[in-house]
Image: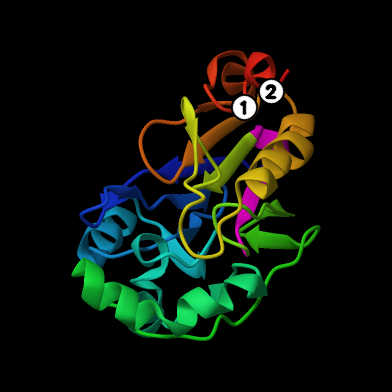
């Protein structure tokens, strides 16, 4: 069975995890949320003999999407995701970059994802879940066979994504986590946008915002 692996590379001053996910059978990979510091990501792919296939975005904040245009140009890769409701963030990504000191260029994703879509990386098939709240167009990638998810800034170990930025909505975020992620099972391991990963089960026990106890 084709397995998924992830190389975790923190980039930008925000120490944003920019996972490179790859298919162990084919070595084909996707750069997820390449916010910047592209030389780190390119070197990691090279050192692990990976074959770049595409760029995937969970959402369009500068620390996650700031390097997408340039990486796409360097490697001639398509940009896939996020959901079209993050268009307004892509439209202003150059201004975001100027404010944050992160170089960025506007781009048009080759594919906008909808809830229920799927995307391939090598022989892997990942399911797409629309999980708004942190941004209006945030999505999550899940490889069910490997019980693995890339959740961007929806969920963290012990915390959840901010909802005080433009387009954020606290109740939407809680609903996304409880209605889309929890039903996938407690044994799903996830890589998040910042800091160490966890499992859904661990967060249902201990997360200060979305544990079963916190929500009861």
For the magenta stretch, what is the residue range? 137-147
Q: Are marks 2 and 1 in contact (CB under 8 Å)?
A: yes
Residue 140 drawn in magenta: yes
The picture places residue 204, in percent across and down from the top left corner, at 64, 20
Query: Is residue 200 visible from the viewing direction of this image?
Result: yes
Image height check: is 172 above or below 110? above
For residue 115, the mark is none
Residue topped by disc 1: 210
Query: Is residue 78 visible from the viewing direction of this image?
Result: no
Image height check: is 147 above or below 180? above
The picture places residue 68, in percent across and down from the top left corner, at 40, 73
Q: Secondary structure at mark 2?
A: helix
User: How many residues crowd mark 1 within 10 Å: few (<14), some (14–19), many (20+)?
Assistant: many
Mark 1 or mark 2, which is nearer the start of the sequence?
1
Residue topped by disc 2: 215
User: Viewer-proximal residue, 7 or 161?
Assistant: 161
Quadrant location of the C terminus? Answer: top right
Image height check: is 76 above or below 9? below
Quadrant location of the N terminus? Answer: top right
Q: Left of 2 or right of it: where is 208?
A: left
The picture places residue 185, in percent across and down from the top left corner, at 74, 26
Closer mark to the observer between disc 2 and disc 1: 2
Image height check: is 91 above or below 57? below
Q: Left of 9 or right of it: where is 25?
A: right
**Image quadrant in which you'd find residue 42:** bottom left
User: How many residues crowd mark 2 within 10 Å: few (<14), some (14–19), many (20+)?
Assistant: few
The picture places residue 77, in percent across and down from the top left corner, at 47, 78
Q: Identify which residue is drawn at 24% across, 72% down.
A: 99
User: Viewer-proximal residue, 132 or 18?
Assistant: 132
Report the colour scheme: rainbow
User: Viewer-proximal residue, 15 or 5?
Assistant: 15
């Amino acid at each position: 069975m084709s397995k998924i692996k992830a190389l975790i590379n923190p980039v930008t001053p925000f120490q944003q995890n920019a996972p490179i996910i790859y298919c162990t059978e084919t070595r084909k990979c996707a750069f997820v949320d390449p916010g910047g510091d592209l030389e780190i990501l390119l070197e990691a792919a090279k050192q692990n003999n990976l074959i770049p296939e595409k760029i995937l975005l969970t959402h369009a904040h500068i620390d996650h999407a700031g390097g997408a245009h340039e990486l796409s140009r360097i490697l001639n890769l398509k940009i896939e995701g996020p959901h079209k409701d993050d268009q307004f963030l892509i439209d202003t990504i150059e201004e975001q970059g100027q404010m944050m000191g992160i170089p960025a260029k506007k781009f048009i994703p080759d594919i906008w994802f909808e809830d229920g879509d799927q995307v391939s990386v090598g022989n892997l098939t990942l399911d797409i879940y629309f999980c708004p709240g942190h941004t209006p167009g945030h999505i999550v990638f899940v490889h069910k066979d490997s019980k693995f998810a890339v959740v961007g800034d929806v969920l963290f170990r012990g915390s959840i994504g901010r909802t005080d930025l433009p387009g954020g909505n606290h109740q939407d975020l809680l609903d996304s986590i409880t209605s889309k992620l929890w039903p996938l099972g407690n044994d799903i391991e996830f890589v998040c946008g910042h800091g160490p990963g966890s499992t859904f089960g661990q967060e249902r026990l201990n997360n200060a915002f979305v544990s079963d106890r916190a929500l009861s």
